Image: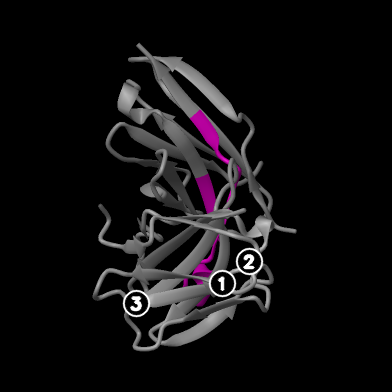
Amino acid sequence: GESVGLHLPTLSVQEGDNSIINCAYSNSASDYFIWYKQESGKGPQFIIDIRSNMDKRQGQRVTVLLNKTVKHLSLQIAATQPGDSAVYFCAENAGFSGGYNKLIFGAGTRLAVHP
Amino acid sequence: DTGVSQDPRHKITKRGQNVTFRCDPISEHNRLYWYRQTLGQGPEFLTYFQNEAQLEKSRLLSDRFSAERPKGSFSTLEIQRTEQGDSAMYLCASSLRDIEDGLGFFGPGTRLTVL
């Protein structure tokens, strides 16, 4: 079936370094992707999204890259801070063309930021 | 705080009991979604409502599960005859019709533990 997955389950970085979290998706027809951050005991928090007609989008300290050729998505966090420690999910919107947001999530990558 | 609230935050029940969860979405949002998240996994889509109409149900939603949104505002998710496999975090999210910012508004979730 269609799925969104992640290459690395755990990523440890030093405070101040840049972090890169990767994600592979399987549905080549997907046209919308979202990155979420989830802290312990909380619901997913929207970080940034990207449409398939783009290959890069930047936010505040975050950049999402989309490579449709290899069906790969990445989230780059610049100058990683302790507050960035969380689980990060990429999600593929399987229902957007129908006007609603049915998301398929990957399993998540835990980011641990060390001082 | 995203503006989506869920109650209760935690529920412990014995196998075979019925449980009901409530979600209050952001007031102007006409779309409401339920997701389920097991430990270490990404959320899985369960169902969604547009106003009071339940427009899609996942195959994950067995006949023991029922969701309602009677007045197009808050929603309830009921699980009858709970099983240990129902133990999970139940997440609610809301959005506006035709929102182009993705599904950004998740509630904090209700964590269900079935003993």
Q: Position of residue B113 (x, y in %)?
A: 55, 53
Instruction: Please determine whether, in this image, residue B7 is positioned above or below residue A67.
Output: below
- Chain for numbered disc 3: B
Q: Amino acid at mark 3?
A: Phe
Q: Residues within 10 Å of mark 3 (few under 14, many from 20)?
A: many
The quadrant where residue A114 appears: top left
| Residue B104 vs residue B44, the one in the foreground | B44
- Chain for numbered disc 2: B
Residue at 38%, 84% (x, y): give it.
B51
Element under disc 3: loop
- Residue A17, which numbered label? none
Residue labelled with disc 3:
B74
Q: Position of residue B5 (x, y in %)?
A: 31, 62
Residue at 52%, 76% (x, y): give it.
A98
Residue labelled with disc 1:
B18
- Residue B82, which numbered label? 2
Q: Nearer the viewer, mark 2 or mark 3?
A: 2
Image-based side of A34 in relation to B97, left or right: right
Chain-order first, disc 1 or disc 3: 1
Determine the CA span between mark 2 and mark 3.
Answer: 23 Å
Chain-order first, disc 2 or disc 3: 3
Residues at discs 2 and 1 in contact (Cβ within 8 Å)? yes
Residue at 60%, 60% (x, y): give it.
B14
Q: Is residue B14 magenta?
A: no
Element under disc 2: loop
| Residue B67 vs residue B14, the one in the foreground | B14
Q: Position of residue B115 (x, y in %)?
A: 62, 53
The answer to whether marks 2 and 3 sit on the same chain is yes
Q: Which residues are magenta?
A: A90-110
Determine the CA span between mark 2 and mark 1.
Answer: 6 Å
Instruction: Please determine whether, in this image, residue B109 is positioned above or below residue A80.
Output: below
Instruction: Please determine whether, in this image, residue B43 is positioned above or below residue B17.
Output: above
